[in-house]
Amino acid sequence: MAPIMALVLGLAAWEFFGRLCDFAFMPPFSKVFTAGCELVRQGKILGDLLASLVSLLIGFGLAASSGVVIGTLMGCSRKIEYLFDVYLAVFLASPSLIYGPVFFALFGISRLTQTAIVFMASFFIVVANTMAGIRSVNTELVEMGRSFGAKRSQLFCKILLPSSLPMIMAGLRMGMGRAVKGMVSGEMFIALVGLGALLRQYGGRFQADRVLAILSIIVLLAVFATSLIQILDRYLNRWRA
């Protein structure tokens, strides 16, 4: 109930200050909502939303699956960590969009370019959190499992993976947020379709109501995607409660 009340109060404040200040770049919420409904009615949202979702799902799916695997390997093996740690630090500190021209040169204006940017935006944070989760496992639990004759696969499935799941899921939530930002940034600068391309189009025309309507849709998409991961997190870690 509290989040709903906070949302209602925020929208009311937006409406009030939008009408009070009457800034061209900050229209009231009612005008933004009307512009969003108009875009949907004209069919200018659904197609671009689906294009963005395809790039987001493919890019983040590849980043999540490969990131968890590589992060696990780095967490379990010091040699693998020393081998890849410097690259992890470099790519974590680098904005994913700077690789856009490289992907554009390789793949041109295609879905591969956008998917690659989404992948780069989310992959390394998933790797870092997974590795940290594996490293944070209580070593006494591992030694106890070994003393009872547990094999490596049993140690991983019964001790390492369950104990590191909270950190892994946190990495996936942060990765999803970065993936949405990478999706929008890539579409604004490279892609011809998608919500980011719509933002560039209406931003160039200084149509603030339509820009804010599309931004609201992007925010709702990010909130919905991270909420799904949180639901999965609560389900997988329900034994901790």
Image (cartoon, helix red, strand yellow):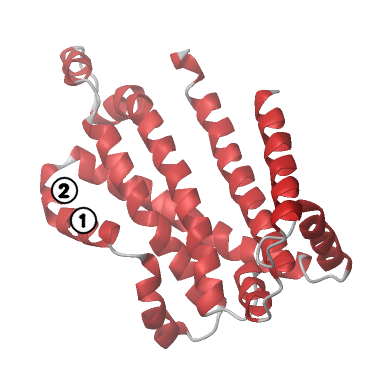
- In the rendered image, residue 58, in percent from the top left (x then y), is placed at 54, 61
The image quadrant that residue 44 belongs to is bottom right
Mark 2 surroundings: few (<14), some (14-19) or many (≥20) residues within 10 A: some
Q: Amino acid at mark 2?
A: Glu
Q: Nearer the viewer, mark 2 or mark 1?
A: 1
27 left or right, relative to 75: right
Q: Secondary structure at mark 2?
A: helix
Residue 112 in view (yes/no): no
Mark 1 surroundings: few (<14), some (14-19) or many (≥20) residues within 10 A: few
CA separation in Å, label 2 and label 1? 11 Å
Name the residue nearer the viewer: 199 or 52. 199
Q: What label sits on residue 81 in the rendered view? A: 2
| For residue 140, above or below residue 37 | above
Q: Would you say the residues marked 2 and 1 are in contact, meaning their CB atoms lie under 8 Å apart?
A: no
215 left or right, relative to 95: right
Q: Amino acid at mark 1?
A: Ala
Question: What residue is disc 1 on?
Answer: 89
Q: Residue at x 84, y 59 (%)?
A: 34
Q: Residue at x 24, y 20 (%)?
A: 150
Q: Secondary structure at mark 1?
A: helix
Name the residue nearer the viewer: 171 or 151. 171
| For residue 102, above or below residue 92 | below
- In the rendered image, residue 187, in percent from the top left (x then y), is placed at 56, 73
Q: Residue at x 51, y 19 (%)?
A: 238
The mark that comes first in sequence, 2 or 1, is 2
21 left or right, relative to 89: right
The image quadrant that residue 198 belongs to is bottom right
